[in-house]
Amino acid sequence: MKKLIFIGLMAALVVTGSVFAYAFTTATATIAVNVIQSDFANVSVNTSYSPPTVFGRYTGTWPTGTLFNVMPYVGTENYTGDLIVTVYLVNAGQLIRYYHHFNMSLDFQDSTGATAHIQSENQTLTLQNAAVLFDWQYGTGTPPYHVEVTGGSYRLHPWRPGGSAQPQIWCEITQR
């Protein structure tokens, strides 16, 4: 009699356990997601800016001009918050092998050429300081905005190895 009860309990466990396992492995959940427009600025590279071609023991200055165009409005909606515009020298580690010094003076300006950030001073991008930021408050200046090269200089090492020595510059826009 005890054996029959034990066998009956084991059979019940096998049946209910397999149903539980089946339900567990095939369970699904649906999560509703609302997509909100996450862009608050459009950034584009200004293709008219042409950096100098460097070679040998070359020493020179950076030509002035627009690196990036920034528009803090998306679609028909205006973004009414403040922004941080960060400009990075992406390949500083590689450039150290080529450049003895690298100084690029940058400014964040509006469409009239006026400085449009809180710091009100140019920021210097160097091999040792490979990121600069501009703090823009909503309502400052007239759009569109630009990251401008306003000067700077460079000099290559006399023993420069072969390969590319062109800087790679990245612009990132985040909410403040």
Image (spheres, rainbow, N blue to C red):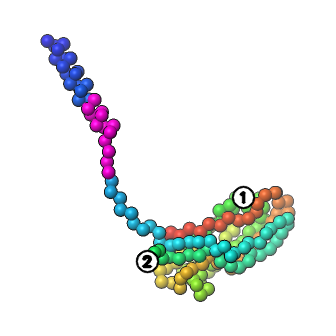
Q: Which mark is residue 94?
A: 1
Residue furthest toward the left?
1
Q: Is 33 placed left or right of 17 in the picture? A: right
x and y, in percent, of residue 10 in the image? 23, 21
- What residue do we see at 14% from left, 12% from top? 1
Name the image quarter holding residue 8. top left
Check disc 1 and report its element: helix, strand or loop: helix
**Contact, CB < 8 Å: mark 1 with mark 2?**
no
Check disc 2 and report its element: helix, strand or loop: loop
x and y, in percent, of residue 30 in the image? 32, 51
**Amino acid of disc 2:** Thr
Q: What stretch is highlighted in magenta?
A: 18-30
x and y, in percent, of residue 132 in the image? 61, 70
Q: Residue 76 carries which label?
A: 2
- What residue do we see at 32% from left, 45% from top? 28
Q: Is 47 placed left or right of 34 in the picture? A: right
First of labels 1, 2 by sequence position: 2
Main secondary-structure element of the magenta-colored stretch: helix
Asked if one can make out residue 133 in the rendered structure from this viewpoint, the answer is no
Name the image quarter holding residue 165. bottom right
**Amino acid of disc 1:** Gln
- What residue do we see at 50% from left, 76% from top? 72
Q: Which mark is residue 28?
A: none
Name the image quarter holding residue 121. bottom right
The CA span between labels 1 and 2 is 42 Å
Based on the picture, tell me whether residue 26 belongs to the magenta stretch.
yes
Q: Taking 164 as reference, is 20 above or below it?
A: above
x and y, in percent, of residue 38 in the image? 44, 67
